[in-house]
Amino acid sequence: MNKYSTLTLVLLTLPVTTFGQEAGSVLFAKGEVSAEREPPVALQKGDNVFEGDTVVTGAASRAQLLMLDGAKVAIRPSSRLRIDEYAYTDPATDATVTATDDKSAMSLLKGGFRTITGAIGKEDNAEYEVRTAVGVLGIRGTDYSAVFCRGDCTWVPGIAAGASIEDGLYLGVVDGRIAFTTPQTTIELGPGEYAFIPLTGSAPELLDEPPAVLLDDNDLLFDADGNSTRGFDATLGQRRKPDASAPQSDDGSEPRPDGDAPESSEAPRQPVIGTDADGSTIDITPGNTPPPQGPRSISYSTGPLGAVTLVWSSTTDNAADELFVDAGNNVTGFQGSYPGRTLPSSATYDIGTSTNVETGFDSMTVLRWGRWSGGTASITLVDGTDVSQSLANQSLHWISGGAGAAPVMPVTGTANYALVGATPPTDTRGNTGVLGNATFFADFTNLIVDSTLAIDINGMMWTASGSGNLGAAIQLPAHLFAGNYSDVTVDGIGGGNGVFSGFFSEPGNTSDPAFPGGVGLTYSLQDAQGTTTVSGAAAFGNP
């Protein structure tokens, strides 16, 4: 670890800014995303952001920005990023522009982001800076992440509920270089290098592995459709050593980490840390055996399915060799029930020619969700019968829990769970809607669960409420549940019906460790006329 002079805490003086010129637009917005301006506005895909805006994301919410110079910024949940100054003129359209005309200055007030920088700063490093409470960050043309913790980084994957995370600024570089300047010193980081600048006034620390606060893979996606354009390479978990011939740091104490480490055939001395299917950190140092994956709960819904079933939701536990995922850890195949003409039958579900869309991940509960859309899902009954389902006008929604043992279920008490994520609901007419609100209540004493939904789809408002039973009361594993929506209305007209099912999971942020931290639920509703079915998946946490 390099030795740097003591860092004095620098508190930002927050200037009062006004609504300024356009800086970029919103590529993607999920959950509660807004711009603090006069007046404040909620942000959606395609909206512009301006100089002076503070972009705010709520819990379990995310935003992605495309700046005018081509930079992309993925903002994590519970964050505040202010655009202090922004000016850019494209030289392709204005030949009179000079390098000094461009400027990008932002302040990270809370939370974190990842960015792939654009044209600003490539010719003149002074054009670009990110201000924080512990110093100022500059670039050399790069792809990097920054997370600022001040008692609020409770969402970190792989960190047990209640565990302390040291306050300060965490930095990591994928490509290019960054320079971080404090009143006393400047440190530089290159590809695969990480640093921590504490709030305590201690010296900055170079880290030998990526800190957990930078490993939430959902924050690293820059494609509006949820596809990664550039992700962290797990092999960069090893911090590269500085070349002995590299220039000295500003205080002359040790070489700056410029340049690559000499090539070596020896195994890395420090562990290589990656992220497992649950978003938790794992040691994937070459030569190590990855930890085995345990059973995983999955709930799914669609409709119609089978010969006569208009609504369908089911939940099961899959062994490690029964559930399949893609490179993004999204479910592409599983074993589950299938509604037959008389009794449900077991079947193998495969994504087939369909596509996983609108996938999501909650790092606290390690719940993942998405929906298969378009094409045809391949479904094969246990007797070999092909019952493949077209998903041209409907979707198969899924939600899966973490790998490992099922949670120990409480035998007494009640808990209300909060919505932390969901797939957009879809109907059998090819429409996609919005899950405006959902609640989930568990009575562990009486083995009862209650669910409510409020859905806006195709210009109509659907509401549903119903009850069900925990598994111990209906001959299912104790952590599973199933129920019916007895009250389903469409624009105030009742008579509809529906079903839901799901599972309890660990870990999660819970005020009482006796309660499981997460709930995965899928649902399927139909109107009174039986002409339209609406399906979806929802994740709950924070009991």
Image (spheres, rainbow, N blue to C red):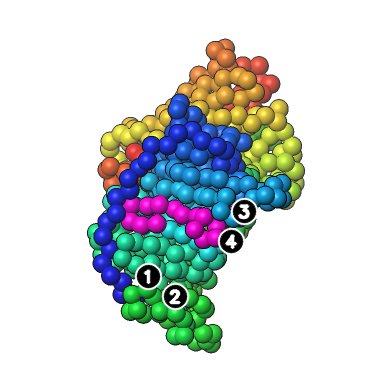
The one nearer the camera, 365 or 225, is 225
Q: Is residue 168 left or right of residue 143?
A: left
What segment is highlighted magenta in the picture?
A: 116-136
Dot placed on the residue nearer the N-terminal end, 2 or 3: 3
Which element is circle 4 on? loop
Residue 266 on image: x %, y %: 49, 87
Residue 357 on image: x %, y %: 63, 44
Give residue 187's mark: none
**Is 386 located above or below residue 426 in the figure?**
below
Give residue 123's mark: 4
Q: Amino acid at mark 1?
A: Leu
Q: Find disc 2 in the rendering and name its residue.
A: 257
The one nearer the camera, 463 or 77, is 77
Q: Amino acid at mark 4?
A: Glu
Foreground tag (1 vs 4): 4
Q: Amino acid at mark 3?
A: Thr
Spatial CA span between label 2 and label 3: 32 Å
Residue 236 on image: x %, y %: 51, 70
Dot placed on the residue nearer the N-terminal end, 4 or 2: 4
Which element is circle 3 on? loop
Spatial CA span between label 1 and label 2: 10 Å
**Residue at image location 58% in from the left, 42% down from the top:** 24
The answer to whether marks 1 and 2 mark residues whose Cβ atoms lie closer than 8 Å is yes
**Is 153 located above or below residue 419 in the figure?**
below
Residue 385 on image: x %, y %: 74, 47
Q: Find disc 1 in the rendering and name its residue.
A: 206
Q: Find disc 3 in the rendering and name its residue.
A: 98
**Is 110 located above or below residue 312 in the figure?**
below
